[in-house]
Amino acid sequence: MRVWSRLIPALAALAIAACAGTWPALAPTPTPQGWTPAPVAIRPVGLGLPGGAMLADGVRFAGGVELVLEAGSPLHSLSDLKLTGDGGFFSVTDAGDLVRGQIVLNRTGRVVGVRDLSWRRLTLADGQPIVEKADGDAEGLAITDSGDLLVSFERDHRVWNYASVTAPANRPTSVLHPDIAFAPNDGMEGLSARPGGWRVAGESGGVWDCSPAACTVVTPVPDVALIDGAYRITGMDRDPLSDGFFIVQRSYRPPLDARAQIRRMAADGAIGPVLIELKIPGTTDNFEGIAAVAQNGRTRLYILSDDNSNPLQKTLLLAFDIGK
């Protein structure tokens, strides 16, 4: 996760085109012990000014919201997004928190809000809550076919299994990850379930298919390092209607050129054409989370942005429908 340290106020003014008005999210319902309710306010957002969003044929915008957070909210810096199949979702933060909630749709299926948000600290292997940033820089999230919740971390690069999504384990176990010397702040941003295991994508390149037995290279790390401003993978989820995946990529060139792209990744790691591009003067930010679900014969994609706890950035949840 590369922090946009040189963003200036003009980005905030140009990037977010929101409908007028903000209202509180629905009051959280009681949660089991260990989960703490996290109130937010919700502001609807569109795609912004013309010329910003570019959607390929067959792609439709299906609504979006901004999560308006107080300065000390634990919901800042959300880094990935995965769905639970019942309208619910999980996310993780750069600070070492696990977050859950429900996506709210209107009668036509468009995103209009989130509800029942709560959070809990991720834990170390000894069961103690994560305290240090170096231990808790969670970037990727996957829910396996067996219901295990996997989290990838950078700085201390690892993938841990927090067991059942219904009751995350207090003592996670380590699972295999690529044997690569990732840079401290440039690691396993993309994490997705796949049949028999999980797929890992490095922010600066490289894709691996892992199982409890081994990790195999799908595409190697590039011989030449990516240049500043190049698109980098920041999130991944499998395509519910094929054997491939969807990825979200981001690019940033100071002072204002912040962009995001959504593309397909084939089973062999080949990356397809751009399906969605977001850039100024439209709605854009630091998108790091992506989740896909089959819906009425189409694929519904959700993308989530990481605001880096920066008041000039936003926490955005956008939805798109892909297919005929």
Image: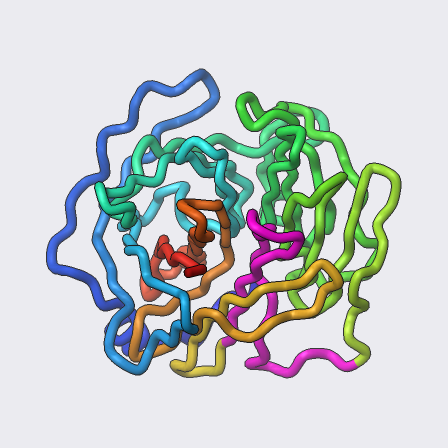
Q: Residue furthest top?
A: 33
Q: Who's the residue at 64% across and 56% down the image?
A: 244
Number of marks present in the image shown: 0
- Identify the coloring: rainbow
Indicate whether residue 322 is drawn in magenta.
no
Q: Who's the residue at 31% across and 69% down the image?
A: 283
Residue 277: x and y, percent? 43, 73
Indicate whether residue 236 is drawn in magenta.
yes
Q: Viewed as shown, does residue 315 lie left or right of 162?
A: left
Up-down: is 212 above or below 253? above
* Viewer-nearest residue: 10 or 64: 64
* Viewer-nearest residue: 226 or 260: 260
* Quarter occupied by residue 174: top right
The answer to whether residue 298 shows anywhere in this view is yes
Q: Who's the residue at 24% across and 77% down the image?
A: 49
* Viewer-nearest residue: 87 or 131: 87
Q: Residue furthest left?
A: 20
Residue 252: x and y, percent? 49, 77
Q: Write the start and end of the magenta stretch as one range.
A: 224-251
Up-down: is 147 above or below 106? above
Please state, as top left, top right, bottom left or bottom right, where the N terminus lies in the image: bottom right
* Viewer-nearest residue: 259 or 241: 241
Q: Viewed as shown, does residue 318 lie left or right of 182?
A: left
Q: Viewed as shown, does residue 288 lie left or right of 18?
A: right
Q: Who's the residue at 72% across and 64% down the image?
A: 269
Up-down: is 52 above or below 160? below
Residue 179: x and y, percent? 85, 54
* Quarter occupied by residue 321: bottom left
The answer to whether residue 137 shows anywhere in this view is no
Residue 95: x and y, percent? 52, 46
Please state, as top left, top right, bottom left or bottom right, where the C terminus lies in the image: bottom left
